Image: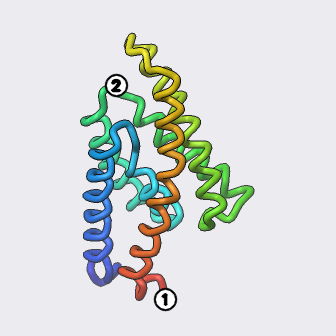
Amino acid sequence: MAAAYPFAWRNFFWWLAYGFVALLVQSRLPGIDAFLPGLIIACQEERPQQLFWLLLAAILIQEGTGGFAFGGTLLWYGFLLLLFRLGEFFFATAGFFFVMLLALGMSVLHACLLFTFGALQNMPVPLSRLAETALIQAALIPLLWGPALLTRNKVLRHEHGI
C-alpha cells in the first residue's frame, strides 16, 4: 500500500487528528455533529474507499454516543451523500458557496431529524432548542471545513501536486 499511495500514513494521521478535534468540539457542543465537515472533505476528494471507512467510523461513534435510537445517524449521513451528489449537478462542490448551501440544508435536516426522533421516542425537544442547534450546526460546518481543508492541503501538499 505504501508504494501505491505514498502519503497513506500522513492521510491516516490527519484523519485521526481530525477525529480527535471533532470529538473535542462535540464534547463542548452537545447535539452538534463535528464529523460532518470532514466527511464533506472526503466527498470532495472522491476516494470511495476512504469515504466508506470514514463514514463507518463516524456512524459508529455518533450512534454509540447519541441519545436517540439507532438509525438517525444513518439518515443524517445518507442525506449528506444525497445532497452532495445532487449538488454536483449544479455547483462546483469544492467551493465555499457550495459548502455554505450544504451547511444550510444539513442544518434544516438536523432540526427535522431531532424533532422526528424525539417525537418517536416520546422525548419532546423544544422548538427553541431545535432552532439553536440548527443555527450552530449551520455555522459550525464552514467554520470547521475551511481550516480543516487548509491543514489537509498543507499536510498532503505533495500528494495534491501543490
Q: Residues within 10 Å of mark 2 (few under 14, many from 20)?
A: some
Question: Where is residue 39 drawn, in percent x and y?
Answer: 44, 55
Q: Which mark is residue 68?
A: 2
Reply above or below: 16 against 29: below
Q: Residue at x 48, y 88 (%)?
A: 161
Q: Secondary structure at mark 2?
A: loop
Of marks 2 and 1, which one's residue comes earlier in the chain?
2
Question: Where is residue 15 drawn, in percent x and y?
Answer: 31, 64
Reply above or below: 151 against 57: below
Badge 1 amino acid: Ile
- Distance in Å between CA atoms under marks 2 and 1: 43 Å
Reply above or below: 31 against 116: below
Left or right placement of residue 150 versus residue 87 in this view: left
Left or right placement of residue 119 versus residue 4 in this view: right
Which image quadrant for residue 2?
bottom left
Question: Where is residue 79 drawn, in percent x and y?
Answer: 54, 40
